[in-house]
């Protein structure tokens, strides 16, 4: 069917790919505004999440009073308190659980609201819809994690090394694509199986358990400890602890960079591919709006 | 232009569409008529690229419906209510979708206000969509479809939840869009609304095309057979009236009492001229004070075409 269009249809001209990219990137800001307005409309939830993290921190503070600090690893040759040790774990644990949950929930919400089809009816690339849907949680969560760490450092008198802030931030940034990729994978699962969020909770719990977030990895059985050393969450937490508690400089981060970059890339590639395949499958089946 | 050729869609053991062909021309409001479950929504979803057909070819403006650039010029009014972010305002929803259509924020705000006014929602612009009624959400849906001034508009039951005035307003908007050269495919089960509004009609029933042509051609299938009569004087007895009709039109007319002694229901066989039946009653001294079709012609056509084997 090659009828000549009677109406001009906009097309991406060769040579205007950069312009098209900018156009798509601008759309992400529309997603950001939308999600901020939606989040702000749930102010109670917004503040209760932050309050919940503080209550968790207070709990760990009292747990820490019972813990013999000598069982904890040393950083830069210095002993650390349990609260200092656990603070990074709490922040990362919250980052990955809330991050994964929100990314998957973003897609599920679109399905539940019936808005996913409306989005797909706009001249927006699937990649932009993916990026836009998760942009708010992915921008907001690192910010919230940083603020949380700063506040509990102040509130509990934690001794973080100022010189380690920038290297810690780098590790955190390198870890983010891994979470993004896992989030997209879980979003693809939710789109395909409609109710896949229970699996996300289990996966996050397993990742956190084998990450050394709340206790040293050395306490795990040896074979679990060996596997856990390649858990990206464990790598990231270890790197941030080295930076913030041991004042390790840039030079000591090569192992983390070496592991986190390919892990993040692989996770992101798998997530993007899975999400695209999920959208294609649902389109073919005609079930994209079902939930 | 919208074209679907030999389109079928199966869901496991269910056949939603079977060998459907439809062509809607530029500037036409083409009605897609059919009862619930006829396959109208499935066809619209296929034409909008949200669902792939099992077989057949579809194109819009001569292009494959999955062409992303086509989405700049195709508007869809979905049948369901669930297509907006309920926690944010109607205007913010339109601004968001406008930006996804490539408008700048300022352009999207201006355009959003224009289309909200066009559908009569300007006073509710800043209210969360969650407090909108079904009818208001439907109008908002139409407003969103008009955001990008579409060359092709796919409309699924747009007036289903609207009051008569709201429905008229939407039809006028859509007719004006078609008048400016856009192609409109208007899916509905409200058959009376297509008269004087749609140019062509495709009637779907159980996934198959039962009729395709103009609205007057559709009405040619009408076989009005049932009338409500208001009679006075003369014979007041039903049996006596039936005898009168039997003499004039043997076996072709039946009369039955209706709600009260003055009202009767007259049924005529195919091909019987109504005037002959009324004349036979008048000749016997019966005054026919009123005569009303029990169904509209278009409804009769619809029923005739969707009847099993029709």
Image: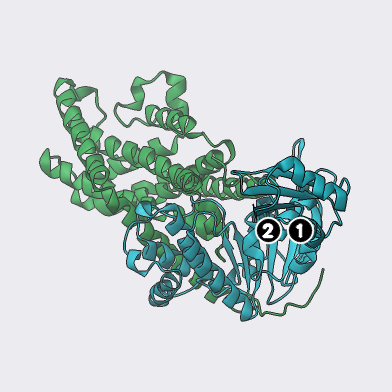
Residue nearest the observer in this picture, A178 or A221: A178
Q: Is residue A64 left or right of residue A187?
A: left
Residue nearest the observer in this picture, B46 or A189: B46
- Chain identifier of the residue bearing label 2 in the image: B
Q: Position of residue B61 (x, y in %)?
A: 72, 72
- Chain identifier of the residue bearing label 1 in the image: B
Which quadrant would residue A207 be assigned to in this image? top left
Q: Residue at x 19, y 47 (%)?
A: A150
* Labelled disc at residue B2: none
- Is any part of residue B234 visible from this angle? yes
Screen quadrant of the C terminus of chain A: top right
Chain A colour is: green
Write down the residue under mark 1.
B278
Contact between marks 1 and 2 (CB within 8 A): the answer is yes
Q: Where B28 sits versus B66, above or below?
A: below
Q: Position of residue A4 (x, y in %)?
A: 77, 78
Q: Residue at x 19, y 51 (%)?
A: A162
**Label 2: element kind:** strand
**Counting other residues with Cα less than 10 Å from the Cα at mark 1, is it few (<14), some (14-19), or many (20 or more)?**
some
**Counting other residues with Cα less than 10 Å from the Cα at mark 2, is it few (<14), some (14-19), or many (20 or more)?**
some
**Label 1: element kind:** helix
- Is any part of residue B9 visible from this angle? no
* Labelled disc at residue B288: 2
Chain B colour is: cyan
Screen quadrant of the N terminus of chain A: bottom right
Labels 1 and 2: the sequence-earlier one: 1
Q: Position of residue B305 (x, y in %)?
A: 79, 52
Q: Where B80 sits versus B164, above or below?
A: above
Q: Residue at x 37, y 51 (%)?
A: B130
Which quadrant would residue B96 be assigned to in this image? bottom left
């Amino acid at each position: 069917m090659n009828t000549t269009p009677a109406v001009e249809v906009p097309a991406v001209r060769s040579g205007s790919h950069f312009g098209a990219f900018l156009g798509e990137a601008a759309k992400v800001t529309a997603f950001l505004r939308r999600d901020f307005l939606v989040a702000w409309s749930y102010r109670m939830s917004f503040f209760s999440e932050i309050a919940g993290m503080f209550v968790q921190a207070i709990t760990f503070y009292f747990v820490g009073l019972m813990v013999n600090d000598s069982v904890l690893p040393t950083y830069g040759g210095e002993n650390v308190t349990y609260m200092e040790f656990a603070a990074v774990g709490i922040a990362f644990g919250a980052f990955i659980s809330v991050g994964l949950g929100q990314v998957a929930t973003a897609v599920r919400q679109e399905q539940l609201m019936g808005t996913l089809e409306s989005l797909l009816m706009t001249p927006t690339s699937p990649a932009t819809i993916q990026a836009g849907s998760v942009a708010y949680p992915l921008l907001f969560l690192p910010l919230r994690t940083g603020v949380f760490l700063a506040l509990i450092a102040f509130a509990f008198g934690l001794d973080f090394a100022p010189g380690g802030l920038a290297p810690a931030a780098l590790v955190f940034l390198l870890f983010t694509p891994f979470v993004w990729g896992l989030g997209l994978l879980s979003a693809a699962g939710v789109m395909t199986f409609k109710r896949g969020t229970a699996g996300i909770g289990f996966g996050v719990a397993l990742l956190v358990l084998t990450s050394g977030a709340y206790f040293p990895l050395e306490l795990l059985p040896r074979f679990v400890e060996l596997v856990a050393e390649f858990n990206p969450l464990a790598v990231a937490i270890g790197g941030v602890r080295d930076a913030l508690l041991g004042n390790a400089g840039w030079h000591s981060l090569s192992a983390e960079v070496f592991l986190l970059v390919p892990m993040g890339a692989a996770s992101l590639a798998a997530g993007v591919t899975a999400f695209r395949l999920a959208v294609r499958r649902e389109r073919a089946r005609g079930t994209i709006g079902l939930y | 232009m919208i074209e679907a050729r030999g389109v079928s869609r199966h869901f496991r053991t269910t056949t939603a569409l079977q060998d459907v062909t439809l062509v809607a021309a530029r500037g036409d409001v083409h009605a897609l008529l059919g009862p619930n479950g006829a396959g109208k929504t499935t066809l619209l979803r296929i034409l909008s690229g949200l669902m792939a057909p099992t077989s057949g070819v579809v194109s819009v403006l001569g292009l494959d419906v999955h062409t992303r650039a086509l989405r700049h010029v195709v508007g869809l009014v979905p049948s369901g209510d669930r297509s907006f972010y309920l926690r944010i305002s109607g205007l913010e929803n339109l601004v968001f979708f406008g930006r996804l259509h490539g408008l700048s924020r300022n352009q999207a705000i201006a355009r959003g206000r224009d289309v909200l006014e066009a559908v009569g929602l300007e006073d509710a612009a800043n209210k969360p969509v969650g407090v909108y009624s079904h009818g208001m959400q439907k109008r908002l849906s139409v407003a969103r479809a008009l955001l990008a001034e579409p060359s092709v508009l796919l409309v699924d039951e747009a007036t289903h939840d609207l009051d008569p005035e709201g429905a008229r307003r939407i039809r006028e908007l859509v007719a004006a869009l078609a008048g400016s050269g856009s192609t409109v495919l208007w899916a509905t089960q409200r058959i009376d609304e297509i008269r004087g509004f749609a140019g062509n009609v495709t009637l779907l029933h159980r996934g198959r095309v039962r009729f395709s042509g103009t609205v007057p051609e559709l009405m040619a299938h009408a076989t009005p057979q049932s009338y409500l009569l208001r009679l006075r004087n003369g014979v007041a007895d039903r049996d006596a009236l039936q005898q009168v009709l039997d003499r004039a039109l043997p076996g072709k007319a039946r009369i039955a009492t209706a709600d009260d002694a003055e009202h009767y229901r007259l049924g005529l066989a195919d091909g019987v001229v109504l005037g002959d039946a009324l004349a036979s009653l008048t000749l016997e001294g019966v005054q026919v004070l009123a005569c009303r079709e029990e169904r509209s012609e278009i409804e009769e056509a619809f029923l005739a075409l969707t009847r099993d084997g029709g």
